[in-house]
Image (cartoon, rainbow, N blue to C red):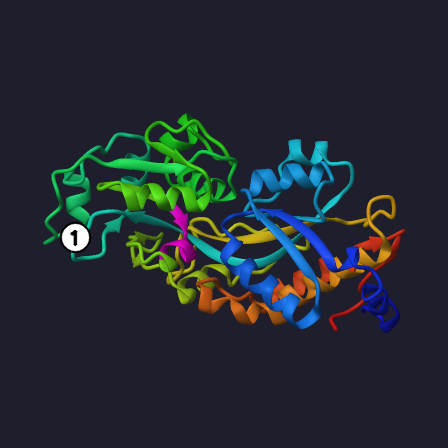
């Protein structure tokens, strides 16, 4: 619990009313709304830099920010570079969608795991390929080259997509693999979800992977993906929530890739805020540590009200409970900062 005494500290320091975060562009549309609302109601300014998950993790390790945001948990190498233990707080759930620029299509494009792997491996190079046509009966596909658009920066969105491809394609798993950055077999690179969305919009015949909110806000077409049950699933709040309705591990690091849920969208993912477990007094005044924990507590509770309108799925009760426990484990000078939700 944040006591009144602690909260009074927040009103005494201008610096304490300013938090700096960086990372996931996947989260940026939601964070922009959340942080504006939080400033309006609580007076705490949050400067968030949408630089990609890899950049956010690097800046957290270098202690140049108060918190990071990532669409993939830190890996062993990143953990080894970190000066202290990092907590992963699940804050939202969304989807990576396959957006395309084919204005001549009147029907929503259907894609299968095999076709997706073929496209991004550079093996399917024309839109009227028989493998795509077989999934889209009655649809006239253009005789047009496929242009792949992918991320050029270290990206949690890339990790989500390549983790999915590695699960559904042995050739992808052995030849390219999963990660925040990979050696792409084909295509053009753009920085951030914004950059990939721009490439798709500007290039007739392009297809690329972006976060659902970017596709919706920019009125971009995106495909239905066949899941494990053989159903072609449109990414929606309902299909993302179906994928995310799972038991949560204590550390909050749950994968939703290639979900078993019959109605679940198969390229869904949690996203996390990253912070140091010990809010060391050498790097943070106490009031700033309290402010950060209070913000994160608000994000996983009241802040979830902004999710659906921006095409993110609100956290499930299991995820909220996991987040509460993780936040209660954060300490300042060895003592818990929060004891329960306010």
Q: Residue 91, located in which quarter of the rendered image?
A: bottom right
> Which image quarter holds the N terminus?
bottom right
Residue at image position (71%, 32%) is: 80
Residue at image position (60%, 68%) is: 37
> Which image quarter holds the C terminus?
bottom right
Residue at image position (49%, 50%) is: 26
**Residue 214, percent across and down?**
41, 54
Residue 169 inside the magenta-drawn segment: no
Q: Is residue 198 above or below residue 240?
A: above
Q: Nearer the viewer, residue 260 or 24?
A: 24
**Residue 325, percent across and down?**
73, 61
Left or right? Give the position of 147 relative to 9. left
Left or right? Give the position of 194 relative to 82. left
Whether residue 329 can be seen here:
no
Whether residue 55 can be seen here:
yes
Q: Which range of residues does the magenta coloring cover?
A: 209-215
Q: Residue 176, located in which quarter of the rendered image?
A: top left
- From the image, tell me which residue sits under label 1: 105
**Residue 113, percent across and down?**
32, 44
Left or right? Give the position of 95 relative to 229. right
Residue furthest front in the image: 14
Residue 214 inside the magenta-drawn segment: yes
Q: Nearer the viewer, residue 141 or 20?
A: 20
Tag 1's secondary structure? loop
């Amino acid at each position: 619990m944040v006591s009144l005494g602690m909260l009074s500290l927040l009103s005494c320091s201008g610096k304490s009313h300013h938090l700096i975060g960086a990372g996931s562009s996947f989260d940026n549309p939601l964070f922009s709304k959340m942080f504006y609302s939080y400033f309006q109601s609580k007076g705490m300014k949050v400067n968030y830099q949408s630089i990609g998950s890899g950049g956010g993790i690097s800046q957290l390790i270098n202690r140049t920010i108060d918190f990071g945001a990532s669409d993939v948990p830190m890996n062993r190498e990143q953990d080894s570079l970190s000066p202290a233990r990092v907590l992963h707080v699940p804050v939202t759930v969304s989807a990576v969608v396959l957006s395309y620029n084919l204005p001549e299509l009147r029907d929503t494009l259907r894609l299968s795991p095999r076709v997706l792997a073929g496209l991004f491996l550079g093996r399917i190079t024309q839109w009227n390929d028989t493998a795509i046509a077989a999934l889209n009966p009655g649809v006239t596909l253009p005789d047009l080259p496929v242009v792949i658009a992918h991320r050029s920066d270290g990206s949690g969105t890339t990790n989500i997509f390549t983790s999915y491809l590695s699960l559904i394609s042995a050739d992808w798993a052995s030849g390219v693999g999963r990660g925040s950055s990979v050696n792409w077999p084909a295509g053009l690179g753009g920085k951030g979800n914004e950059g990939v969305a721009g490439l798709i919009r500007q290039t007739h015949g392009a297809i690329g992977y972006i976060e659902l909110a970017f596709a919706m806000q920019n009125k971009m077409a995106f495909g239905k993906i066949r899941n494990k049950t053989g159903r072609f699933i449109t990414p929606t709040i309902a299909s993302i929530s179906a994928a995310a309705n799972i038991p949560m591990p204590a550390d909050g690091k749950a994968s939703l890739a290639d979900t078993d849920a019959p109605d679940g969208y198969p390229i869904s993912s949690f996203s996390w805020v990253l912070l140091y477990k010990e809010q060391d007094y050498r790097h943070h005044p106490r009031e700033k540590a309290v402010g950060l924990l209070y913000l994160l507590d608000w994000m996983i509770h009241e802040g979830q009200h902004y999710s659906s309108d921006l095409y993110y799925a609100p956290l499930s009760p299991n995820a909220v409970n996991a987040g509460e426990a993780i936040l209660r484990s954060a300490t300042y000078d060895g003592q818990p900062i929060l004891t329960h939700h306010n």
